[in-house]
Image: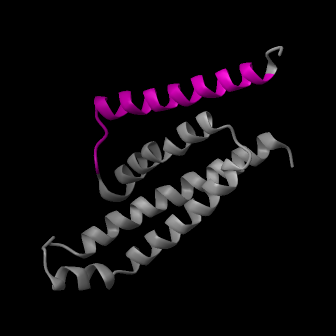
Amino acid sequence: MSMRRFYLIGFLVLVCFDTFAQICFKLTANHAMPPEANLAWVIRVMSSPWVYGAIACYVGAFVSWMTLLRHAPIGPAFAASHLEVISVMALSVVLFGERIDAPQLIGSALIIAGIVCLAVSETNAEHAPT
């Protein structure tokens, strides 16, 4: 498997794990309403199947991230790991009826621009004469 394909699949898996972990936490929070600082609230949280989905997704994200870090350049890897902010935002519109306004769109564009800039600079550094 080529490294480019490895990165593409690896980051897709990482973003999926991170995204689903955040969605599971939101579903857990909805299940445990109202938020209270007492044992009844903790029991509601722990009785939600979504909290266990979130934990499983975080374990998957950790394994994915550690695998990617063995091979991927750290700058673009770190930046690309933040794509989950955009995917969670998009899924929140579909699943929870949330709105996306101009600040969220601008922030998403900046995240994508940052990832592209780091990827281009990393590519240029690989091809630069030493």
* Residue sitting at x 55%, y 41%: 78
Q: In the displayed structure, does residue 128 sit left or right of residue 65?
A: right
- Image coordinates for residue 50, horizontal then vertical, percent: 39, 75
* Residue sitting at x 23%, y 80%: 42
Total number of numbered labels?
A: 0
Q: In the displayed structure, does residue 104 sit left or right of residue 58?
A: left
Q: Is residue 28 above or below residue 86?
A: below
Q: In the displayed structure, does residue 30 sit left or right of residue 14?
A: left
Q: Any magenta on residue 129?
A: no
Image quarter where the C terminus lies is top right
In this view, the residue farthest toward the right is 1
Q: Is residue 65 above or below residue 113?
A: below
* Colouring method of the image: one colour
In this view, the residue farthest toward the front is 130
- Image coordinates for residue 125, horizontal then vertical, percent: 73, 21
- Image coordinates for residue 98, horizontal then vertical, percent: 28, 49
Q: In the displayed structure, does residue 24 sit left or right of residue 3?
A: left
Q: Is residue 129 above or below residue 42?
A: above
Give 59 or 98, whichever is nearer the viewer: 59
* Residue sitting at x 46%, y 71%: 55
- Over which residues does the magenta segment extend? 98-126
Q: Main secondary structure of the magenta part?
A: helix
Give 107 or 75, whichever is nearer the viewer: 75
* Residue sitting at x 73%, y 24%: 123
- Image coordinates for residue 94, horizontal then vertical, percent: 38, 53
In this view, the residue farthest toward the top is 129
Q: Is residue 115 above or below residue 13?
A: above
Q: Any magenta on residue 107?
A: yes
